[in-house]
Image (cartoon, grey):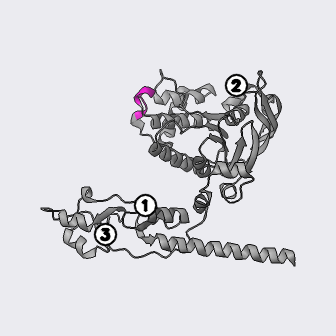
Amino acid sequence: MIRFESATKTFPDGTVAVNGLSLEAAAGHISVLVGPSGCGKTTSLRMVNRLIEPTSGRVLVDGRDVRAVRPAQLRRGIGYVIQQAGLFPHKTVLDNIATVPMLTGATRRQARSRAAELLELVGLPRTLADRYPAQLSGGQQQRVGVARALAADPPVMLMDEPFSAVDPVVREQLQNEFLRIHKELSKTIIFVTHDIDEAIKMGDRIAVLRVGGTLAQFASPAELLSRPADAFVAGFVGRDRGYRALGFTPAGSLSLVEEPTVRLGDSLTAARQRQQEGWVLVVDAADAPVGWLTTDTLGAAEGQTSIEKGMLHLGGTLATETGSLREALDAALSSPSGRGVVVRDDTRFAGTVSASHVLAQIAARATAVSSTSDTSCEEVTA
């Protein structure tokens, strides 16, 4: 657990970066600091490992004031991941990861063995172990940075915009991979970002900071979206917060349509027979959706007798049976056929859903919530 108690940082020129910050980052959870530039996110983060000392107030880790611990000792128990990974350019990937365990007393053999395990944990092949940072892509470097931060198995991790320097596709992959790792390891994490979408995805709780380093709201993502504390928070979260809030509403009892499918390699004749409203869904040998085939494509496929991957529209996003209403609606709206593809947790095709059906479910839930609120108000009045 990490606790800020009226933590304040004023720089020599009089700039107040953090002003009376009080919040508690729960053990085993991800707490995200988010806000506009100049709101004190990174300064707050660095007060935890004493890269910046608070002017007043306290920062405690597991009930102990960080100023009571020597900086070097404190930092050995705190993983730290920054935007550009911060790898040693003259060391191989394996030796970069092994650095911290060796500093804490592990032998070279032990440290390198642990580093090899962590390569696999962060989704990197062991063939990269002997490469140098300059030989890696940006996403691979960030994964190595995460592995190095995990190398000493620290109970606490600080992450300062760790995924912002990579492209959107790699960024999403890194986010998903880290959430998977966190589910296994349950570290106490403070995560800094300027991106509210990333904050909502990554955080168990989110602290929205104002310029000048004051706390505007500290809440779960669902509460932040549904009940922003004031106009500043509502504006920062964005006008589409109602749509984002659907990400926390289970799809539940959405009834799926049994969509006819064909497999890659099947005959074009079979595709023509199974198409509906100009489209037919194509799945692979494992029943995972791979794309849509159109009537126009079928008509223009001269000289071809079977379905090939190059003939397909890749389609929209996929929703899962156990996912949210936002997933289901996005799948329907992004699908070229207008029929959102829903898969089981093992990626096998489950059925399709239309946007109108999802919207009807949203409307029904909104009515139910409104009725509950009205009943509560009547009880209070009575």
Ranked by sequence position, the earlier of labels 1 and 3 is 3
Residue sticking out furthest to the left: 303
Nearest the eye: 344 or 166: 166
Gap in angstroms between the C-alphas marked 1 and 3 = 15 Å
Q: Position of residue 232 (x, y in %)?
A: 71, 48
The N terminus sits in image quarter: top right
Ranked by sequence position, the earlier of labels 2 and 3 is 2
Q: Residue at x 46, y 40 (%)?
A: 167
Asked which secondary structure carries label 2, the reply is: helix
Q: Residue at x 45, y 71 (%)?
A: 353
Amino acid bearing label 2: Ala
- Give the quarter of the image for residue 63: top right
Nearest the eye: 166 or 67: 166
Select label 2 or label 1 by which is in front. 1
Instruction: Classify residue 249 as left or right of residue 353.
Output: right
Q: Position of residue 343 (x, y in %)?
A: 44, 65
Q: Which residue is mark 2?
A: 72
Nearest the eye: 292 or 73: 292
Q: Which residue is mark 3?
A: 279
Gap in angstroms between the C-alphas marked 2 and 1 = 51 Å
User: Could you tell me if residue 264 is visible in this image?
Assistant: yes
Q: Which residue is mark 1?
A: 334
Gap in angstroms between the C-alphas marked 2 and 3 = 62 Å
- Give the quarter of the image for residue 299: bottom left
Nearest the eye: 257 or 361: 361
Q: Position of residue 288 (x, y in %)?
A: 37, 63
How many numbered circles does the render carry?
3
Amino acid bearing label 1: Ser
Residues in magenta? 128-135
The C terminus sits in image quarter: bottom right
Instruction: Classify residue 379 as left or right of residue 108.
Output: right
